[in-house]
DNA sequence: CAGCATCCGTTCCGATACTG
DNA sequence: CAGTATCGGAACGGATGCTG
C-alpha cells in the first residue's frame, strides 16, 4: 500500500484541510449555493461565531479551496466561493460522506443508537 | 449534493475516526503488516509515547477499525490488526492519500516548497 | 457588514513515573 | 511487555467588546 512515510504526510495533509470544527459545514454550504456572503454563512451556520467563521475561511483560503472577493462598498460586502481547484475536493467529501453514513449505521449495530442518528 | 444537515454529521463521523495525531500512521502500518504487537508499533513509530499509542488504539478499537488480541502469557503479549470491517477504510485512505499528494504539489506551486516536500 | 482583539475554558498531547 | 496515573504546556475554540 504505497510508501508509508509519504502516505503519512499526504493523508495528514488532506486531513489538515478538513479538520476544524466548521470547515465541513462551510464547504457543504458553499458547494451547494455557489457563492455566499459572510453574513449569509453566519445565518446558515447559527452556532458559529464571527471569529471562528473568519479563521476557518482564512485557512481554506490559504489552501486555495475557497476564494474571497471583497467589494469596496459601504457597508462592506464580501463573498466566498469554492475555487476551481477546491472543487477537486468534492469526490473526497462524497467518499467521506458515504463512509461516514455506513459507519454511523455500523456503530448503531454495535452499540445501539444512543446518540440519536435520526433527524437534525 | 446530498442533504447538507446529514452530510455534516456523516463527514464529521468519518473525520472523527482519522483525527488524532497518530491514527493515520497506525493504520498504515497495520494495513501494511497485517498484525503488529504493541512494542512493534512503538518501534515503527519512534516518536509516539505509550500513552498516546494506547489511547489512539483504544479509540480505533471502539470504532471497530482495529482488533486487539491479548495473549494470557508472561510477559504480556498483545497483537493489533485491522478488522474486516476496518478494511473498508482503505479506499478512503487511498483517496485521501491521492488528494493529499496533489495538494502538496499545489501548495508548492502556490507558495514554493518551504516545508520540505522531499524525503521522510 | 465584516471583521479584529482580548480573555478564558477545554481538549489534546508530551514527559515522566509507576505497575501487574 | 503492555500498559496506567499524574502533571503541565500548547493548541483549539467560545464569549464578548471594539472598529472602519
Image (cartoon, coloured by chain):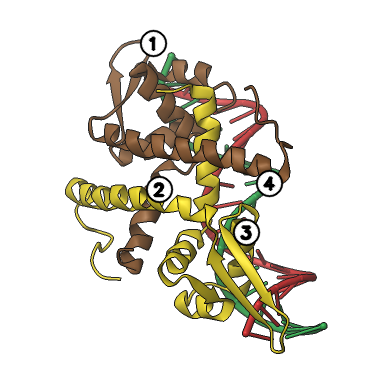
Chain colours: A brown, B yellow, C green, D red
Q: Could you say whether the residue bearing mark 2 is in a helix, strand or loop?
A: helix
Q: Chain of mark 2?
A: B
Q: Which label was assigned to residue B61?
A: 3
- Same subunit: marks 2 and 1: no
Same subunit, labels 4 and 3: the answer reads no
Closer to the camera: disc 4 or disc 1? 4
A93 over B55 or under it: above or below: above
Q: Are marks 2 and 4 in contact (CB under 8 Å)?
A: no
Residue A107 locus on image (x, y percent):
64, 43
Q: Secondary structure at mark 4?
A: helix
* Image location (x, y in percent) of residue D6: 78, 70
Residue position marked by numbered label 1 in the rendering: A75
Q: Chain of mark 3?
A: B
Q: Nearer the viewer, mark 2 or mark 1?
A: 2
Res A110 label: 4
Alpha carbon separation for disc pair 2 and 3: 18 Å
Q: Which mark is residue B92?
A: 2
- Residue B95 percent across, percent down from the top left: 34, 48
- Quarter of the figure that contains the C terminus of chain B: bottom left
A48 vs C19: above or below: above
Q: Nearer the viewer, mark 2 or mark 4?
A: 4
Mark 4 or mark 3: which is in front? 4
Q: Residue at x 54, y 24 (%)?
A: B5
Residue B19 can be seen in this image: no
Cβ atoms under marks 4 and 3 closer than 8 Å: no
Q: CA distance from mark 2 to mark 1?
A: 44 Å
Amino acid at each position: 500500500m504505497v510508501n508509508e512515510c509519504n502516505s503519512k504526510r499526504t493523508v495528514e495533509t488532506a486531513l489538515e484541510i478538513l479538520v476544524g470544527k466548521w470547515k465541513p459545514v462551510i464547504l457543504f454550504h458553499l458547494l451547494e449555493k455557489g457563492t455566499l456572503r459572510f453574513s449569509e454563512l453566519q445565518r446558515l451556520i447559527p452556532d458559529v461565531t464571527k471569529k471562528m467563521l473568519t479563521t476557518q475561511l482564512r485557512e481554506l483560503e490559504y489552501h486555495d479551496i475557497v476564494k474571497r472577493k471583497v467589494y469596496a462598498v459601504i457597508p462592506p460586502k464580501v463573498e466566498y466561493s469554492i475555487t476551481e481547484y477546491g472543487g477537486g475536493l468534492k469526490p473526497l467529501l462524497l467518499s467521506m460522506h458515504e463512509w461516514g453514513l455506513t459507519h454511523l449505521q455500523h456503530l448503531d449495530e454495535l452499540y445501539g443508537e444512543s446518540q440519536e442518528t435520526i433527524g437534525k
